Image: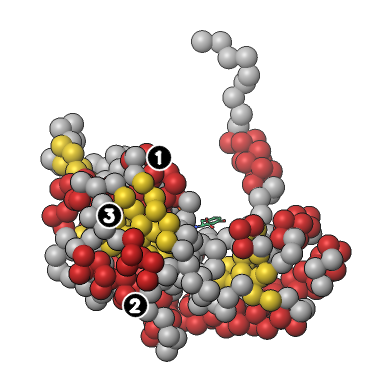
Amino acid sequence: MASSQSNKTGREIFEELSQLKQKDFNFSSGRILGSMCTVPHPIAREAYIRFLETNLGDPELCPGTKEVESRFLAFIGRLVHAPRSAAGQIVSGGTEGNITAMWLAKQLSGKREVLLPESAHFSFQKIASLMDMKLVEVPLTKEYTLDINTLKKKISSKTAAVVGLAGSTELGTVDPLPEISDLCADEQVFFHVDAAFGGFVIPFLRQLGYKVPPCDFTLKGVSTISLDSHKMGYAAISLGTLMIRQKQWLEHISVESPYISSEKQAGILGTRSGAPVAAAYAVTQYLGFDGYQNVVKSCMNVTQYTETRIKELGLGLVVEPTMNVLGVRLKKPGAVVKKLAENGWRVNKVERLSAVRMVLMPQITTQMIDEFIPVLKRVCEEVGEV
Ligand code: 0PR
């Protein structure tokens, strides 16, 4: 077949690709201050490349990669104190983790109603649409966490699942997980913990002596926990894990898979790369629990420093930070975000709270904050914030 356009050489292709890539903001510049992702740990990069061709959708073809997955899941299992009966399901991130958990809850209960905090991630809107589930929002307290008393009133024989947040998207707040767990255990209702962001933060905050509730299976009412390696796990996009209290529950989200060598396939995806799994596993082995604790400690130091510098400008926070997420109260968050972007800095707008969100990920240093603060000050003066 005649081609109207001659093929490009490798050099031309990479020139084109790097020109386009240069348009992106990059994490190493330190100017992305609102994203929940980070530059992957160097060890993740190397592991990712080595597993490019692997497919965990056909594990019999890749028994070695399957073993990497099992070892990775064993690490996550230890992190969340998974009982022997538990299983882990690899997912592409927090959205798929939540979808899979709600699919499970719907299958197990035969019901459709989900009770979730007002602060829940927008992926639940997709769940409602995809699976015809009904979302019932539970209001928040002034601390911006789920109000347990209202939850107690709303839970009923129609409830398929209750959702609690271990690190909310907007502010990093943690819902009263032990109280929700007790309620769900009493009522025998499925309890999903969305720890997409906090899963790799909370266990280490606790080790460091911070007063935050646990987000693990020591809470007897917890059914599933979703946690993302591509957020605070320091790994490459896209990887999350859904930990499930009872392995046999997987039967409810499995189908027969006649064309591949394994008899059944659980979860949403078919073909899926082993590369992000290898990358995430490599980081866990390199850092270990001590390494993650150090990462969290340093993120919290930078968070505290940023909070002090922001308050010096006369700005306030929506709530005191629980983890490395700050919500800065502003009159015109949209205008501030826009002007900061024009100056090369990215923070996220949280219109609902009249705030901007800053996430102090591992790549952010106090020196970068020192560069940011004068720009924020100037921008706030220009739009009449201070
Ligand atoms: N659950 C919670 C609590 C989340 O914060 C998020 C994402 C999800 C689930 C969904 O996770 P995936 O996006 O991995 O499917 N929260 C971030 C947010 O909406 C996602 C993000 C990350 C956005 C990096 C921007 C960015 O640069 O803010």
First-in-chain label (1 vs 3): 1
**Image location of residue 205, percent across then percent down:** 43, 81
- In the image, taking residue 355 as reference, residue 183 lies left or right, namely left
Instruction: Report which residue position mark 2 lands on.
Output: 214
Quadrant where the C terminus lies? bottom right
Label 3 residue SS: strand
| Residue 189 in sight from this viewpoint | yes
Q: Nearer the viewer, mark 1 or mark 3?
A: 3
| On screen, residue 230 above or below 204 | above
Instruction: Report which residue position mark 3 lands on.
Output: 159
Please name the amino acid that badge 2 sits on.
Pro
The answer to which quarter of the image holds residue 309 is bottom right
Instruction: Report which residue position mark 1 lands on.
Output: 129
Label 1 residue SS: helix
| On screen, residue 146 above or below 123 | below
Q: Nearer the viewer, residue 110 or 226?
A: 110
